[in-house]
């Protein structure tokens, strides 16, 4: 069984400089614009009540987000129930469903800077995840996408790791967010191990009376 630690090890990856590219993703619709507005209002509400002398970097960036270029990324949820019905390398793609969450790429001065994930909570959008150095981490991807069959790609997370899916030479390519390509077979084993680990953790918590 392939260990998840396999993906978290240090890799020596040849990557190009972060060339100016703010075209990753698509333009925002009124729905996404409204979500950004909600995030700003959330941050303003928090900072107004807080006694902190300096606000977190993520909050400062969101307050100044109007001066950036924002695009919506094709973000998908990984449905472990679908995958576990008949786990196989081919089942990975079938297990991806369009997420209700909104994943934004933020570019500054023409370069990818950071990303943020918004979740709907009741009638408002709230900040779920802010990835400060995301643009630096995935700077390999825009150029690799130029060599792909099309600009069609998907981003999803499973086992706490972000993956990119795109197509090249008629094949589905999976890669970690640091640019390491992974075969469907290895990814299938990694996903199975992560599901098993989640189940084991749940069993342990249940055994000590901790429930979520």
Image: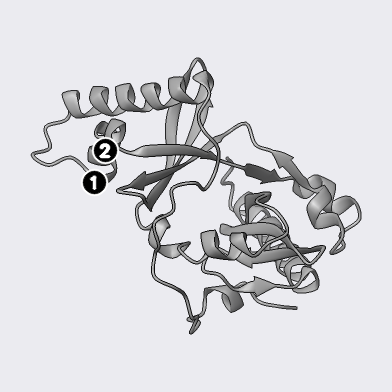
The image's colour scheme reads: one colour
Q: Which residue is located at x 39 percent, y 70 percent?
A: 17
Q: Is residue 17 above or below residue 92?
A: below
| Quarter placement of the N terminus | bottom right
Q: 146 or 187: which is nearer to us? A: 146
Residue 159 visible at all: no
Q: Residues within 10 Å of mark 1 (few under 14, many from 20)?
A: few
Give the image location of residue 69, x and y in percent.
38, 38
Q: 167 or 100: which is nearer to us? A: 167
Q: Which residue is located at x 62 percent, y 58 percent?
A: 164
Residue 44 in the figure: left or right of residue 200 = left
Q: Which residue is located at x 71 percent, y 78 percent?
A: 2
State the residue lying farthest toward the bottom: 12
| Quarter placement of the C terminus | top right
Residue occupied by mark 1? 57
Marks 1 and 2, how far apart at CA: 5 Å
Q: Quadrant of residue 59?
A: top left
Residue occupied by mark 2? 59
Q: Residues within 10 Å of mark 2 (few under 14, many from 20)?
A: some
> Residues at badges 1 and 2 in contact (C-beta under 8 Å)?
yes
Disc marking residue 49: none
Q: 189 or 134: which is nearer to us? A: 134
């Amino acid at each position: 069984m392939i260990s998840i630690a396999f993906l978290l090890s240090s890799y020596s990856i040849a990557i190009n400089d972060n060339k100016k590219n703010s075209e990753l993703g698509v333009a925002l619709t009124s729905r996404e614009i409204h979500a950004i507005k909600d995030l700003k209002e959330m941050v303003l509400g928090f900072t107004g009540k807080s006694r902190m002398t300096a606000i977190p970097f993520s909050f400062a960036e969101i307050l100044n987000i109007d001066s950036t270029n924002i695009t919506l990324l094709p973000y998908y949820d990984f449905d472990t129930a679908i995958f576990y019905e008949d786990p196989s390398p081919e089942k990975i793609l079938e297990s991806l469903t369009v997420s209700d969450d909104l994943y934004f790429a933020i570019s500054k001065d023409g370069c990818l800077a950071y990303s943020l994930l918004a979740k709907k909570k009741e009638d408002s959008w709230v900040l779920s995840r802010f990835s400060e150095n995301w643009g630096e981490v995935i700077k390999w991807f825009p150029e690799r996408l130029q060599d792909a069959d099309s600009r069609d790609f998907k981003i999803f997370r499973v086992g706490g790791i972000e993956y990119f899916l795109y197509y090249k030479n008629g094949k589905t390519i999976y890669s970690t967010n640091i640019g390491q390509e992974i075969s469907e077979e290895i990814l299938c084993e990694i996903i199975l191990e992560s599901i098993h680990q989640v189940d084991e953790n749940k069993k342990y918590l249940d055994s000590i009376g901790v429930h979520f």
